[in-house]
Amino acid sequence: MTIQLDQSQRKVAAFTGAAYGLMFALAIGGGVALASVLPLATNPSGIVSVLSSNEQWVRIGMFAFAVIFLLDISVSWGLYVVFSVVDKMRALHAAAFRLIYSAVLAVAVGSLFVGVQLAESGEFPPALVAAFVVGFQSIWAVGLTAFGLHLVILGWLIITSGFAHKILGWALGAAGTAYVADGLLQLLLTEYQSVAGFMAVLVGVLSIASELWLTVWLVAKGASRRSNAL
């Protein structure tokens, strides 16, 4: 199947790839900042203490994820423009699920921000502060299931169209399935922590490999007139 992008669509592909790359950098930085702080305590009083003593790191993480939210909207639009040349309806569905994820991410970051503000004031019970912090993690987990569905649809679109290498499509589909499975397990398992480490590694490896490939493919697509690259 021969599919060509016009000049404006190639520019969108290049922009989307660059935005995706920036999101990767922010996700790593923001994720490290939050991961180095949030798991340090499990009881409400401990969470308040951790937030108060590591507020700057938490704010850096929140800032990174706020920028990711804004970039994600642009990436959703860019992916729709690029993949609509293959199938407008499926491209629209993929974009919709990514936008749902973006909206949920914004709510999750808002929950964490409220928790930080409450902890900083010192006027609210630790249990309330902890509820907003735990809410960030839980809400984000639910949002990642929508992101997983986005990747599954995108992968299916690639596999069935030949627009990109089919292995990329399978890789995106596998990453998306892992995201969905992880989100469902968090909702269904009372002992999720027993599989949390394995799922984190599985999701991390599959998503980094497939989405980095997608990032490179988008940039290459924007720089080339050929119908298939990478």
Image (cartoon, rainbow, N blue to C red):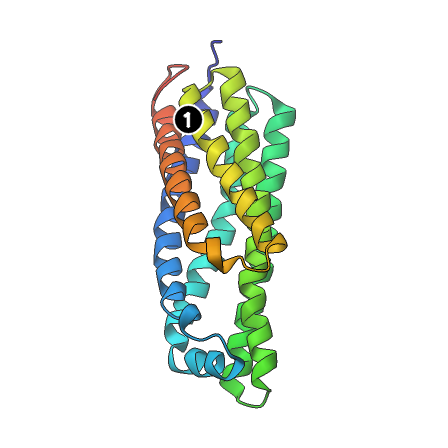
Q: Residue at x 57, y 30 (%)?
A: 153
Q: Is residue 77 visible?
A: no
Q: Nearer the viewer, residue 117 or 35?
A: 35
Quarter of the image holding residue 77?
top right
Q: Position of residue 4 (x, y in %)?
A: 46, 15
Please name the amino acid that badge 1 sits on.
Leu
Q: Residue at x 41, y 26 (%)?
A: 168
Residue at the top extreme of this rendering: 1
Residue at the bottom extreme of this rendering: 123
Q: Is residue 156 left or right of residue 31?
A: right
Position of 4 relative to 42 (above/below):
above
Position of 39 relative to 179 (above/below):
below
Q: Position of residue 104 (x, y in %)?
A: 60, 54
Q: Secondary structure at mark 1?
A: helix
* Neighbourhood count class around disc 1 (C-alpha, 10 Å): few under 14, some 14–19, many 20 upward: many
Quadrant position of the C terminus in the picture: top left
Q: Position of residue 154 (x, y in %)?
A: 53, 30
Quarter of the image holding residue 63?
bottom left
Position of 56 relative to 73 (above/below):
below
| Number of numbered discs visible in the structure rendering | 1
Q: Residue at x 44, y 78 (%)?
A: 51
Quarter of the image holding residue 92?
top right
Residue at image mark 1: 168
Q: Nearer the viewer, residue 139 or 25?
A: 139
Q: Position of residue 135 (x, y in %)?
A: 59, 66
Q: Is residue 121 visible?
A: yes
